[in-house]
Amino acid sequence: MKNEFIWGVATAATQIEGAPNQDGKTETIWDVMSKDGAFISDSHQVDTADDSYNKFNEDLELMKELGVGAYRFSLNWARIIKDGDGEINQKGLDYYSKLVDDLLDANIEPYITLFHWDLPYELYKKGGWLNRDITKAFKRYVEVVVDAIGHKVNHFITFNEPQCILGARLGGTIPEAKYSARDRNTMVHNLLLCHGEAVKVLRKCKNIKIGYAPCNDARIPLTSSKEDIEAARQSYFDVRRGDLSGVSVFSDPIIFGNYPKKYYEVNRIEDLPDIKEGDLELISQPIDFYCQNIYQGLYVKSDGNGGYKIVKPNKNAVYTLMNWVVSPESLYWGPKFLYERYKLPFYITENGCSVTDIITEDKKVHDSPRCEYIKQYIYQFKKAIDDGVDGRGYFCWSLLDNLEWFEGYKKRFGLVYVDFETYERIPKDSFYFYKNLIKK
């Protein structure tokens, strides 16, 4: 890797902070949705998490021991602006300001994600992403953040995994809600408008570099033939009616200034969002770097007619506890295809795995499968960089075991084991493996 390459770890506010009512924080959709015990597996609640809001000093010491150069974390909108569009909550703002100061004092670069799924509940009640006025609320939120800490944070990421936010299941919506095709396309458009407004605000600080972090399963050509490689590339950026998981619908408007041509072809005219004059110009404000969260890949081959076919993994495939296939080549082909298309400095902002972690009597966690996973995936990312991808950094997901959204606390991704009853932190073998890897 290049000398300036950034090694980091990542977390998200709702998944680690806890303290749902502390210091003036108001409710998010996740706070509300988990209350009845039916929404998250085993009736787990989001309000406990890792209590990192009160234990960040411990987490910082772990990062210092780990030796990372950067920490990617998200801000909770409802902790900074009451109900998303109400009064500024100074205590919440002060908390994040001190967190940034503590990171900088430790020579750890903060990479801040402005939105990682925790929509203020009162904004949801006003229509959420369906209401174009959310752009005004988001712009104000970003202005407050920039005024407070923009002068000392050099890297901001506007949105994490927008495909999940608007999937009518994760992050930005209530699962029981029913959305038409036009509703879903409108939510995409309004989110992209929020991104554009955020970029304009962030640009007021000349020190800030701006990124964006969508997701999708990478595409891996089944063979090295030109036909299979082209089929995999085509599949990665394809647009299919009713499918909001793809890369191009969420990224082409930002980087190229318009939705992909096929987006207009597969959607009926009446299902398209109301694209007003100036919208696409706002959405396509230039960004400085492009990110992707990649955990697995889908294998693709040519169908022999200029198209593609998704191929099931073979019988020897290995899966994580999330039932995601272990496919290290996804960190070669994903970055390669994305960099070829978007030509921006590139970061892996999430990569990691959930495996069975057993704590021994002497409080050790021997998670060799996670160590091997990290090793193999990073090898493939290095290979992509050696082959021309302008890779700038890798963020391991995650520093801590945490709330894995619908899975609750059952699926552990952390380099650090967390006892969810006592909040004790115990570094796993993978923690020390990653530490040694960073040193090389």
Image (cartoon, rainbow, N blue to C red):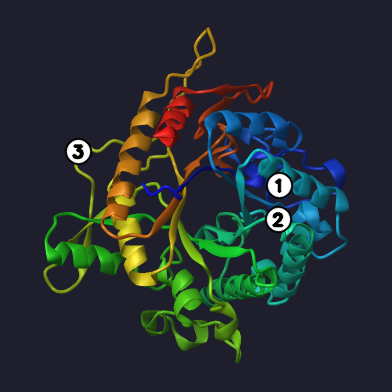
Q: Which residue is mark 1?
A: 100
Name the residue: 59% across, 35% down: 402
Q: Is residue 354 visible?
A: no
The alpha-carbon separation of the residues under discs 3 and 1 comes to: 47 Å
Label 1 packing within 10 angstroms: few (<14), some (14-19), many (20+): many
**What amino acid type is highlighted by mark number 2?**
Lys
User: Extreme front residue here?
Assistant: 3
Q: Which residue is mark 3?
A: 315
Which structural element holds mark 1?
A: helix
Q: Position of residue 440 (x, y in %)?
A: 39, 34
Where residue 187 sits, quadrant-wise, is: bottom right
Name the residue: 14% across, 66% down: 227
The alpha-carbon separation of the residues under discs 2 and 1 comes to: 8 Å
Q: Nearer the viewer, residue 124 or 220?
A: 220
> Given this view, does label 2 or label 1 mark the residue nearer the observer?
2
> Given this view, does label 3 or label 1 mark the residue nearer the observer?
1
Q: Is residue 150 visible?
A: yes
**What amino acid type is highlighted by mark number 1?**
Val
Kindly indicate whether the residue at mark 3 contacts the one at mark 2 (C-beta within 8 angstroms): no
User: Left or right of 135: which side holds 238?
Assistant: left
The alpha-carbon separation of the residues under discs 2 and 3 comes to: 50 Å
Q: Position of residue 272 (x, y in %)?
A: 51, 83
- Sequence order check: which comes first, mark 2 or mark 1? 1
Name the residue: 69% across, 21% down: 422
Kindly indicate whether the residue at mark 1 contacts the one at mark 2 (C-beta within 8 angstroms): yes
Where residue 56 sits, quadrant-wise, is: top right
Which structural element holds mark 3?
A: loop
Q: Nearer the viewer, residue 220 or 93?
A: 93
Q: Position of residue 312 (x, y in %)?
A: 23, 49
Q: Residue 152's mark?
A: 2
